[in-house]
Amino acid sequence: MAIVESIFDIAYLSIVLSLGIRLLLEKSKEAKLFGVMAIILGLGDSFHLLTRVISHLSYGGFEANAPALSWGKFITSITMTIFYVLFYYYYRSQSQDDSTLKRNIIYALALIRIVLTVLPQNNWGTMSENYMFGIYRNIPFAIMGALLIYWSYKERAKPGLKNMSLYILLSFAFYVSVVLWADKYPMIGALMMPKTMAYLIIVVLGYRHFITGFEKKNILGLSYTSLIMGLIGGVFYREFTKFYGYQAENHLSKLHVHVLVLGFLLMLILYMISKEYEAKRMVSLKKPIYVFMSGFTFTIVNMTLLGIYEVVSEGKDIVSKPALEGLSGLGHIVLAIGLVQIVLKVFQHETVSGFKQTEA
């Protein structure tokens, strides 16, 4: 379970941040807004989810990391609030509902939520968080969610809001269940995974609303996104190992190079090769690229997980390293299949182009 949740958490963060970065490339202000939403969601959740990953993979476990987990939850509580304030503006742009009353209600609920969150009675950073304050601070948040669910549902006919209310409802249903009953029934805490999945689907829905079809710029967008993610990976490697005083070689040191070469450079080269292709040829590259990116993402996620494990495990066998390496191998296999498919498609197209030029 530790490996599964850790892979899920890192994959979620990677995908949400990547989609957010990609949306920032779009000209539409609404797309940029949704991109900012996704990035805030990913960055905020990283403080909590990465700490959970570290807890799963380190000798001290969750008890040793309790203060960090608590502060991570604190940061996530604030960023989730900001996320839904921004979602209100997204709803407003899609529905053309410029009600001042609705805006003020959202502002008021967000402010109350943040004020309740920062109060010392929450006991942040300790192993004994205040259960009742956990409920108090989530009351305005739940009301905000209920309103956004209702408003989005009423405007569900709008393309940008289709199914949004459903996944917001699911995210809140799972989240509220954890808040109310996880302390008494720890297994209910597992509902945070489907809650996180609901958030991921919300981001994917927004991404697919703004980026439809498959065009040349999609490949360039993948290249740019990989460039930023590669740089983030390099910073993460440097700061994470510095924090733990870890100086030996590990998988994190290879992270940014893999992302920059297999993501940024490869997609940039593919864009340069294919930029003269007509629409039909471009569409033929869609499936191979998706296969490649799936394997690429899974490989990078497992590489990140292996690197974190090497740093925080202190040489102890907390989880099965061969299992982690085996999963990474699966990612490499899918990546290789996608890469071969891409090369074959490009070769076919270039051969046809060369033949036509010879005939001419």
Image (cartoon, rainbow, N blue to C red):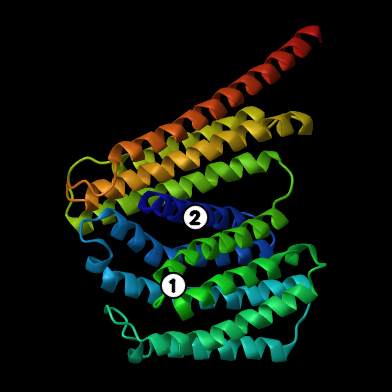
Q: State the count of labels.
A: 2
The kind of secondary structure element at disc 2 is helix
> Given the image, on which type of amino acid does mark 1 rest?
Thr
Vertical placement of residue 193 versus 111, above or below: above
Give 239 or 165, whichever is nearer the viewer: 165
Residue positioned 73% across, 74% down in the render: 152
Image coordinates of residue 164 in percent, x first then y, are 69, 67
Indicate left or right for 64 with 145 as reference: left
Vertical placement of residue 356 versus 345, above or below: above
Residue positioned 59% across, 78% down in the render: 85
Image coordinates of residue 298 in percent, x first then y, are 47, 41
The residue where tag 1 is placed is 76
The residue where tag 2 is placed is 12
Indicate left or right for 352 with 167 as reference: right
Indicate left or right for 315 with 270 as reference: left
Image coordinates of residue 19 in percent, x first then y, are 57, 54
Quarter of the view holding residue 270: top right
Give 55 or 274, whichever is nearer the viewer: 55
Vertical placement of residue 104 versus 1, above or below: below
Residue positioned 53% across, 87% down in the render: 139
Image coordinates of residue 45 in percent, x first then y, are 44, 66
> Given the image, on which type of amino acid does mark 2 rest?
Tyr
Quarter in which the C terminus is drawn: top right
Which of marks 2 and 1 precedes in the sequence?
Answer: 2
